[in-house]
Amino acid sequence: MAVPSNVIYFTGYDTLRTSAWSPFAHLGAFWGPLIAGSAARAIAATAISPIEMFKTRLQAVSNTHLNSSKGIFRATFDTTKDMVAKEGVRSLWRGLELTLWRDVPFSGVYWLGYETIKSFIRSERERERHLTFTDSFIAGAVSGSVAAFLTQPFDVGKTRRQISAPAGVETKGDMPRVLYNIFKVEGASGLWRGCVPRILKVSPACAIMISSYEVGKKAARKMNEKHEV
């Protein structure tokens, strides 16, 4: 799931941000990365949702299936096929709305912050050799931390919708209603509960992914230039 998701996400962002045909290519330094990042995440999440659904069902299959002649993978496949037959193909995208509420704003804020911070770092030392890995690592870590903090309420809301909520907190309905109910009962602290652990997880992950991507892209560009010569 992670491999196709990141391929679609990163190449989707680059394409939407820089291609001449993209409607987001000429939106400027603020709206360009914000909208292109959000759109790329929406496309990636939608494309991968059926695989995520299968993964979730695979993890939820009872251990009794391990002793069946089919095996746990085949048993999960059969139950998923039955679900589609009864509820339609759209059932494969169940839960996508919750993912989009969290990941789309995160990605918009992340790419806006990443492009802004990277440009600032490079402008501050424009006479020095540009270290792609260092620039990208720092910008990715900082922007990932900011995006994780700002979108923490959506992560809390997504989690509350998926698990049992504390007594007195209503978690049915759309995301805005869920967040309002959490705020009404628990205050602002309830919306940002678990923020520090999430930042500690997201920040290094964003830094490693984006710096690896930038280094790989730079190496691929050099290889293409050599072939063209």
Image (cartoon, grey):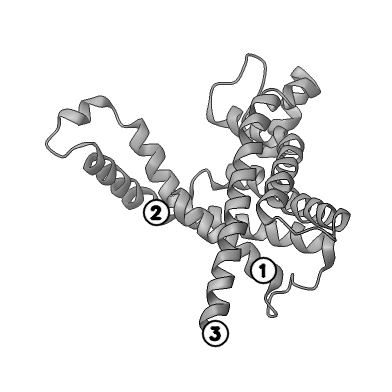
In this rendering, position of residue 80 left or right of residue 25 = left
Q: Name the residue carrying label 1.
A: 16
Separation (CA) of disc 1 from disc 3 = 25 Å
Front of the two marks 1 and 2 = 1
Describe the element under mark 1 as helix, strand or loop: helix
Q: Residue furthest bottom?
A: 229
Q: Earlier in the sequence, mark 1 or mark 3?
A: 1
Residue drawn at (81%, 58%) of the image = 128
Instruction: Report the amino acid beneath label 3.
Output: Glu
Q: Quadrant of residue 29?
A: bottom right
Separation (CA) of disc 1 from disc 2 = 32 Å
Q: Name the residue carrying label 2.
A: 88
Residue drawn at (43%, 51%) of the image = 50
**Which one is in front, 199 or 219?**
219
Q: Earlier in the sequence, mark 3 or mark 2?
A: 2
Query: Could you say where residue 164 lies in the image, as x and y percent from the top left?
Result: 54, 21
Front of the two marks 1 and 3 = 3
Q: Is residue 43 visible?
A: no
Residue drawn at (66%, 60%) of the image = 39
Q: Quadrant of residue 12?
A: bottom right
Q: Residue furthest top?
A: 167
Query: Could you say where residue 71 lies in the image, as x and y percent from the top left?
Result: 19, 37
Q: Which mark is residue 228?
A: 3
Front of the two marks 3 and 2 = 3
- Number of residue marks: 3
Instruction: Report the amino acid beneath label 1.
Output: Leu
10 Å neighbourhood of mark 1: few (<14), some, or many (≥20)?
many
Q: Residue furthest front?
A: 128
Q: Is residue 52 visible?
A: yes
Whether label 1 touches label 2, CB < 8 Å: no
